[in-house]
Amino acid sequence: MVVEVLVLVLTAQSQAFPPDSASVMIDRMRKKSDTHRVAVAVLPGAPIFELAVPCEVFGIPRPELADPWYEFQLCATEAGATIAGGFTATTPFGLDDLAAADTVIVPACRNVHERQPADLVAAVTEAHARGARIAAICSGAFVLAQAGLLDGRRATTHWMHADELRRRFPRVDVDELVIFAQDGRIHTSAGTAAGIDLCLELVRQDHGTTVANALARRMVTPPHRGADQAQYILTPLPSANTSPLSEVTAWAIAHLDQSIRLRDLAARAHLSERQLTRRFLETYGRTPGDWLIRERLRRAQELLEQTDLTIDAVAGRSGFGTAAGLRAAFAKHLHTAPSDYRNTWRAA
């Protein structure tokens, strides 16, 4: 509406302006009104990197790549909030601006075990109801989950927080293997560097592959990584004080090189197989079989990183039996080969 009024005013005053001047002003106003507005939530204690990524991708004008680029706003949940590293967020924008944006990005939160700020959750919910695109980087997924926006949706987060997200929000389809996930207008990413991948994907959806690739080159990063975070996952066993299954899991860890069946675990826990499965799901968010596979993979990863054992020997000590069995498990769950994993992590 503003553009149409300006057109009428400039047309009526056409004799007061050179013809090309009026057209330039109208064009600029139209571009401004069409600019996609990206708002990023700034929480107290927020990690620097996850906050800096959307600033780099969306906050720097790049008219040579696309014009208009983005209108960018940092929206503080608290005025003058101090973020990680002692930086202070000085911005005139707040949660009302966040709720009115076209794309809302929630970087990592300070503590995944705490309930997230209610006013932030409400602003994100309002933005989604208006039709905004919502994205979370790393543990920002917990804000979206608390808002109910991930219910029944596939989502990801940092692999270290995946089980906690799954436990607290069982209606979320958590996939900790992928770098980022999209389900409708909801986007989530894995930790830290995966935020770059997600932001570049949003640019690709808005401006096309050519623009996204050009931006990636400027940032000196691949425009699209074919990897995932599967091979980074190293799930620790909960401590004896927090796990009601500590005795049976400790026994399993000590006997990974042997054949372990569900009935063996149930017998040691003095539970039926059904009861044991329910306890594992409540405690670890996994069935006993899935938990055992993860522990065998964890043992194999440690052996590949820290020893010069052959692949056959690693397979035997981790309970996969043969090199072929180990390779199949790595391909299915870690999306890599044992030898490639060793080369990558031994070099690192």
Image (cartoon, rainbow, N blue to C red):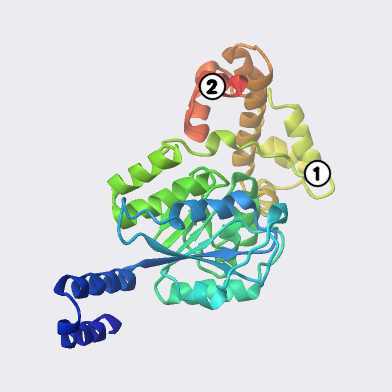
In-image side of 276 versus 184 (left or right): right
Compared with 171, 226 (above or below) is above
Dot 1 lies on which element? loop
Amino acid under disc 1? Ser
**Dot 1 crowding, Cα within 10 Å, few <14, some 14–19, many 20+:** few
Q: Which mark is residue 311?
A: none
**Dot 2 crowding, Cα within 10 Å, few <14, some 14–19, many 20+:** many
Q: Residue at image x 58%, y 72%?
A: 121
Compared with 338, 87 (above or below) is below
Amino acid under disc 2? Pro
Rendering coords of residue 162 (x, y %) = 60, 50
Residue 231 in view, yes or no: yes
Rendering coords of residue 273 (x, y %) = 66, 46
Quadrant containing the N terminus is: bottom left
In this view, the residue in front, 166 or 197, is 197
Dot 2 lies on which element? helix
Q: Which residue is denoted by mark 2 in the rendering?
A: 338
Residue 155 in view, yes or no: no
Rendering coords of residue 179 (x, y %) = 49, 44
In this view, the residue in front, 195 or 301, is 195
CA distance for labels 1 and 2: 28 Å
Rendering coords of residue 89 (x, y %) = 64, 63
Q: Which mark is residue 239?
A: 1
